[in-house]
């Protein structure tokens, strides 16, 4: 009997690997994508009163009244067997939207679809101030109306093609690629189209995205929060606000804070944590991001979590023999191989602990 079970596991694993390889090569999966339900909704948000404009000044035809600000847009897909697994919430980084997790720039399967095909409910969130999520624009209107100084305008971040090339580690300098680079550089223009203005400078403290992520996990009756780059530490920030719904935290390529208190570390140590970094962390010339320092800061953070008896793993892809991954590893040519690593970690560290 044990031999039959083992053989069945081997066959299943072989089938999973075959499907993974087909998708990596750009071949469409043999089986259609089947979902039980899909939809979208908003999390959080608060009402804000806008006073009527002074007589004679106007506000582009907008009278006074109430508006909703800082709401977070979420879209989801749930597979037929989704109830067996903990939902995964994916949050994008700077100057991007939840498109990050969808079809890759060169047209291959993204993590959102792949996780659904592996029976995981997937929730994609746009950060507050980005894409379909809301933000408080009243300061912009106030400056336009002359009732606030121009110095109050937010710093809107644009990531240029040149900055993206080095920050995302496609090569050592703009226009030159790493010989073993995994990013599909022939489709770089499609990535540039994904990059949009970042209005996070308009947000209050704490960032409403953190609060909304924590609230989403509660709404889902338990969820794994995944962040990348700018949002890489957002799962932990959400857990410091309300850890009750967070079953696991996956943090991909970001700096980790060194000023967390022992009490904060104790809170975070109660939730399984995976930190993942790609390749060429110290091989880029110039640029604002120092990924080697970010890696070191997260290695120290993971050690603090472990010292507090937490379940934390620092996953360095080069140390595992997986070379050439960029900062956009969910879009790299081997993205589904990396997704399998994450799914294996989830099964061992989150799903395996249900009911314990």
Image (cartoon, rainbow, N blue to C red):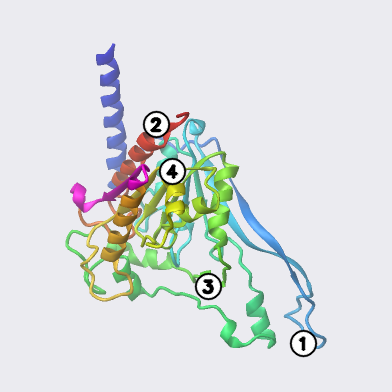
Name the N-terminal-most of marks 2 and 1: 1
Percent position (x, y) of residue 73? 58, 55
Q: Is residue 124 above or below residue 55?
A: above
Q: Marks 3/2: CA distance? A: 40 Å
Q: Residue at x 29, y 70 (%)?
A: 166
Tell whether position 74 is magenta: no
Q: Marks 4/1: CA distance? A: 53 Å
Q: Seen in the image, is 319 located left or right of residue 226?
A: left
Characterize the local packing of mark 2: few (<14), some (14-19) or many (20 or more) Cα atoms within 10 angstroms: few
Q: Is residue 262 visible?
A: yes
Q: Secondary structure at mark 1?
A: loop
Q: Secondary structure at mark 2?
A: helix
Which label is found at residue 342?
Answer: none
User: Which residue lies under the disc numbered 3?
Assistant: 201
**Which of the pair 232/130 is nearer the observer?**
232
Q: Is residue 27 visible?
A: no
User: Which residue lies under the disc numbered 4?
Assistant: 271
* Residue span colored magenta: 306-322
User: Which residue lies under the disc numbered 1?
Assistant: 57
Residue lying at the far top of the rendered structure:
1
Q: Marks 1/3: CA distance? A: 27 Å
User: Which residue lies under the disc numbered 2?
Assistant: 352
Q: Secondary structure at mark 3?
A: helix
Name the N-terminal-most of marks 4 and 1: 1
**Which of the pair 296/155 is nearer the observer?**
296
């Amino acid at each position: 009997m044990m031999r039959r079970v083992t053989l069945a596991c081997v066959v299943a694993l072989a089938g999973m690997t075959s499907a993974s390889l087909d998708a990596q090569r750009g071949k469409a999966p043999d089986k259609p994508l089947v979902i039980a339900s899909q939809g979208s909704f908003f999390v959080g948000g608060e009402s804000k009163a806008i006073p009527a404009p002074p007589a004679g000044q106007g506000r582009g035809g907008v009278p006074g009244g109430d508006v909703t600000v800082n709401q977070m847009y979420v879209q989801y897909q749930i597979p037929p067997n989704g109830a067996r697994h903990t939902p995964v919430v994916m949050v994008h980084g700077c100057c991007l939207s939840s498109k990050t997790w969808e079809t890759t720039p060169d047209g291959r399967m993204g993590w959102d679809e792949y996780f659904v095909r592996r029976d995981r409910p997937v929730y994609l969130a746009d950060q507050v101030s980005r894409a379909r999520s809301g933000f408080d624009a009243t300061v912009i209107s106030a400056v336009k109306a002359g009732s606030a100084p121009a110095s109050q305008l937010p710093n809107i971040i644009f990531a240029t093609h040149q900055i993206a090339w080095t920050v995302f580690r496609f090569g050592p300098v703009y226009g030159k690629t790493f010989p073993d680079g995994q990013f599909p550089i022939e489709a770089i223009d499609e990535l540039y189209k994904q990059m949009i203005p970042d209005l996070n400078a308009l947000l209050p403290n704490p960032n409403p995205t953190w609060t909304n992520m924590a609230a989403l996990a509660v709404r889902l009756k338990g969820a794994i929060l995944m962040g990348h780059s700018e949002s890489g530490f957002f799962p932990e920030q959400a857990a410091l606000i309300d850890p009750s719904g967070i079953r696991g935290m996956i943090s991909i390529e970001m700096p980790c804070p060194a000023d967390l208190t022992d009490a904060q570390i104790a809170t975070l140590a109660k939730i399984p944590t995976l930190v993942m970094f790609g390749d060429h962390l110290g091989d880029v010339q110039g640029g604002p991001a120092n990924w080697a320092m970010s890696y070191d800061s997260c290695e120290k953070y993971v050690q603090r979590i472990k010292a507090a008896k937490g379940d934390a793993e620092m996953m360095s892809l080069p140390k595992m023999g997986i070379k050439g991954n960029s900062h956009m590893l969910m879009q790299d040519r081997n993205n589904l191989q990396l997704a399998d690593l994450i799914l294996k970690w989830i099964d061992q560290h989150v799903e395996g602990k249900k009911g314990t």
